[in-house]
Amino acid sequence: MDTSQNLSRLSAIVQSSEDAIISKNLDGIITSWNPAAETIFGYTSEEAMGKNIRIIIPDDLINEENIIISRVRRGEQIGHYETVRRKKDGTLFVVAVTVSPIRDENENVIGASKIVRDITELKSAEQKQAMLAAIVDSSDDAIVSKNLDGIITSWNTGAEKIFGYSQSEVIGKHISIIIPKDRVDEETVIIQKIRNGERVSHFETVRRRKDGREINISLTVSPVKDKNGKVIGASKVARDISERAELERQRQLFTERLQEINHYKDEFMAMASHELKTPLTVIKANLQILEHKMQGDNKIDFVNKTLNQVNKLSNLITDLLDISKIQNGVLELNLTAFDLIPFLAEVIGSIQKTSPDHKINLITKSKKLLIRADSNRLEQVMVNILTNAVKYSPNGKIITVESAMQDSNVVVKITDHGIGIHQDDIDKIFTRFFRVRGLASTFSGSGIGLYISSEIIKRHGGNMWVESEIDKGSTFYFNLPADKSQK
Ligand code: ADP
């Protein structure tokens, strides 16, 4: 092959190369610029030729270029170094460069040729991989991969910590090394799912550490696929949940213990109330006889006061017994059909007698409001709401009771203008023994009445609720299904 043939072949290679091939003289002036250089840097050959090579070098890398030129002057070749170059539009990108000296016929270095390859994509793929590797390595979870035969192919630091085996001890071993004997079947099921391309999420199970200790873990296993989408293995992420499982176990034990204690307390309360009730009934009967016999005696006042206190005690015991009945689901209702309006008038009348300072009004548009209910239990509810309305309204003297039909329910509404209830306490006042904090010194009470009342209403198939504003007053509501069997 003669020289001219050789030259034209070389020229063809340069023209068709995918890498930028550039030459420059020792002053840095560009003397050749192939088509790939045009594509990579964005400068046409006309734009680049005769310019200083600095047009493609970021300002802060000029020094690097000077060092390279001086090495080329000494006749050195600089093979494959990675650096950054600048395109015509200013974007910087990562390149791999090889620089070789160009010599004249006397072997004097007169310039340099550069082969520049754009490695941006390669770099970002490498970076991504390095980042993923770092994530896997720094994870506290065990991240393990295995092939479809269950052979371990990777094992991160988290896995070393959780299972106690170092990487070199387990790579190439079967995953059953960490599976307790009675759970080996699990692995077969998991592998079957993985073969089908399915994932196993947050599966809570037990695994065995190198020291033999069994630990609770939460496992997520995902299929690993090759480029063609074929499942070739599985990746497992395992989290040690022993601590959580232990806490859960303790919580469960604690709850069971509390339930047990609560049950004893209920039993004790029921038994004590029952045992108190009998002597108290005898005391009350005797006091009543005494009161009768002492009419006109100036010492009758002592008897009356005692009887009063005995009545309070008796009511409290009745309430405690009611609570036991509700708790044990044995609160029985004796249902009869009656008209609510005269019933309300009567209850209001009796409360009005003992609360002369307040005025209790009854408002109703209906002539008749027929319900089927246990009238004694309903009286208990009304007495409780009305005595509360009186008790918690030391300054608001008007109390209103309204009743009306609403859809197929009868609604009763009791409004007072008293101290009101804070929004935070509204939902709590119907629970057992709840009393609004700070009230005890001013208002006596036990926090039982509203609990029993709302349970009685619920047992009737109704509901009880309250609307209230501090210092403005409260409105208690309850509804009951209307009795449609009568007219
Ligand atoms: P208590 O015997 O304490 O009155 P209740 O179960 O009847 O028990 O009521 C529970 C709590 O609800 C009361 O302690 C009180 O704080 C609040 N409460 C009940 N009714 C009213 C009302 N009409 N106005 C303001 N607060 C009330």
Image: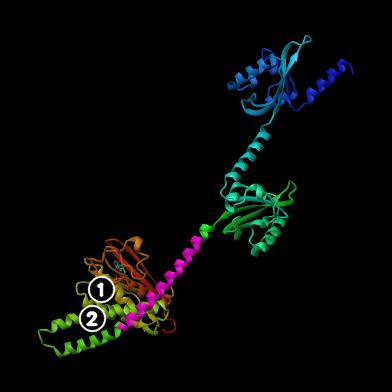
Provide the residue designation for mark 1.
360
* Residue found at x 81% / y 20%: 11
Provide the residue designation for mark 2.
310
* Foreground label between 1 and 2: 2
Q: Secondary structure at mark 1?
A: strand
Q: Is residue 200 left or right of residue 32?
A: left
Q: Which residues are magenta?
A: 246-275
Where is residue 363? Give x, y as percent: 30, 74
Is residue 333 visible to us here? Answer: yes
Q: Looking at the image, is 385 positioned above or below residue 101?
A: below
Could you tell me how far apart the alpha carbons at marks 1 and 2 are, in whole angstroms? Answer: 28 Å
Where is residue 486? Give x, y as percent: 42, 84
* Residue found at x 66% / y 34%: 123
Q: Looking at the image, is 210 positioned above or below residue 320?
A: above
* Residue found at x 73% / y 47%: 226
421 vs 12, nearest the viewer: 12
Quarter of the picture for ligand 1?
Answer: bottom left
Q: Is mark 1 within 8 Å of ligand 1?
A: no
